[in-house]
Image (cartoon, grey):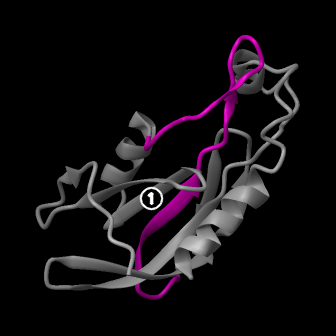
Amino acid sequence: DLRGLMSALWVENNRHWDELADQNTLTQLLGTGKPTQREYLGCLVGDVAGDTLFVRRLVHAENLKQLQFAVAGDCDGVERLVGTFHTHPYRADAAGRAVKERGLSAMDLKTFAAAPDMVTMVMWDLDSLDIATKAGDGSVRHPVPLAVR
């Protein structure tokens, strides 16, 4: 199922989340710390029926460039593209403890607002998703409810 695939991708890209003891956010952001995790980007395939957006599949983004706290890739050429999915890794606080980045960041929402996508999703833990959608007029709606069927 789709949620299971998203969870598996999160686990795969964050499998060293507990190796942050000698790291902190500053060294990680400067790129001088060891990369313990990577962000992931996928393309969401689906359709719209009435006022409901259905996400049916997740495919890997092309030209994927994965960094510790950034990801790039493209979904050009993906048929029935409705949006993107990405992961947020844990960050290390000053004491090297894992800190979750909960939800879509301000940069995530700004990037989404400028994109033609109808939905963007982020996962920051196995049971944690945040979603933004666009209204018919293109305005961003965040947060939005999710129903798993």
**Going 38% across and 81% down the picture, which residue do you hit?**
149
Badge 1, how many Cα within 10 Å: few under 14, some, many 20+? many
The magenta span reads: 77-104
Q: 27 left or right of 48?
A: right
Residue ranking furthest to the top: 94
The quarter of the image holding the N terminus is: bottom right
Can I make out residue 74 in this image?
no
**Going 11% across and 62% down the picture, which residue do you hit?**
137
Q: Is residue 91 magenta?
A: yes
Relative vertical location of residue 11 with respect to residue 32 in this rendering, above or below: below
Q: Callout 1, which amino acid?
A: Met
Q: Position of residue 101 (x, y in %)?
A: 54, 35
Q: Position of residue 92 (x, y in %)?
A: 71, 24
Relative vertical location of residue 83 with respect to residue 114 in this rendering, above or below: below
User: Quarter of the image holding residue 117?
Assistant: bottom left
**Going 41% across and 47% down the picture, which residue do you hit?**
111
Q: Position of residue 12 (x, y in %)?
A: 78, 60
Q: State the residue position of label 1.
A: 121
User: Quarter of the image holding residue 106?
Assistant: top left
In terms of depth relative to the viewer, which is nearer, 30 or 95?
95
Q: 55 left or right of 52?
A: right
Relative vertical location of residue 98 with respect to residue 136 in this rendering, above or below: above
| Element carrying mark 1 | strand
